[in-house]
Amino acid sequence: MPKTKFQEVIFTLIMVVVMVYVMICYNIALEMGGMKNEIFLAAFGELIIMGPIAFILDFFIVGILAKKISFKIVDPTKENPFHLILAISAVSVAFMCPLMSMAATILFKNAGTEFFAVWLETTAKNFPMAFFWQIIYAGPFVRFIFRLIFRKNN
């Protein structure tokens, strides 16, 4: 886990790229009626837009909130520290998913007068994918990459 602000920036950047890219692919696939090879390339166009939004939200708002809430739920001195990681991940998704779904609804959905309904539908479709992708794949993968980058030289 990050120990300095610089490490926190790097960790957040890696997590944003991994989470946002996959969620964009998922949403494009939903729109196209299924996964296609072209989606992997198309997702980079949206990543340029959604990535900075996700970074700002996570680094300056959601990450701070998720840690505060998680430390109220889990006491790492009395419980397995992994429970804290799971809590932070779950709380992050609980906040980031509706916020990023709102950004996507505003920027890409052309919802018009149906904005609220489209935002709720987008959030409902994204939440299970975001939650399981974060807990099972993205979180462990990003922590592994982070440890490789910042491993101690013994």
Image (tube, helix red, strand yellow):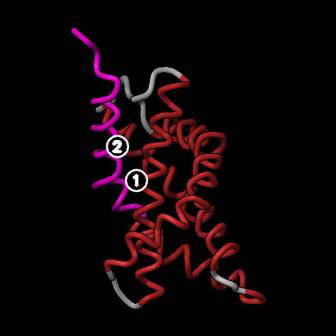
| Residue 37 percent location from the top left of the image | 31, 78
Please report the residue visible at 60 percent of the width from the left and 37 percent of the height from the top: 64
Label 2 neighbourhood size at 10 Å, few (<14), some (14-19), many (20+)?
many
Please report the residue visible at 70 percent of the width from the left and 81 percent of the height from the top: 116
Q: Which residues are magenta?
A: 130-154
Image disc number at residue 142: 2
**Which is more N-terminal, label 2 or label 1?**
1
Q: Which secondary structure, mark 2?
A: helix
Q: Nearer the viewer, residue 48 or 53?
A: 48
- Does residue 56 appear to the left or right of 127 in the view shown? right
How many numbered discs? Answer: 2
Quarter of the figure with the C terminus: top left
- Does residue 91 appear to the left or right of 105 in the view shown? left
Residue pointed to by mark 1: 18
- Does residue 153 appear to the left or right of 52 in the view shown? left
Dominant SS type (magenta): helix
Q: Nearer the viewer, residue 53 or 73?
A: 53
Dividing the picture into quarters, in which one does residue 103 lie? Answer: bottom right
Q: What amino acid is found at the position of numbered circle 2 in the picture?
A: Val
Dividing the picture into quarters, in which one does residue 113 lie? Answer: bottom right
| Residue 87 percent location from the top left of the image | 42, 45
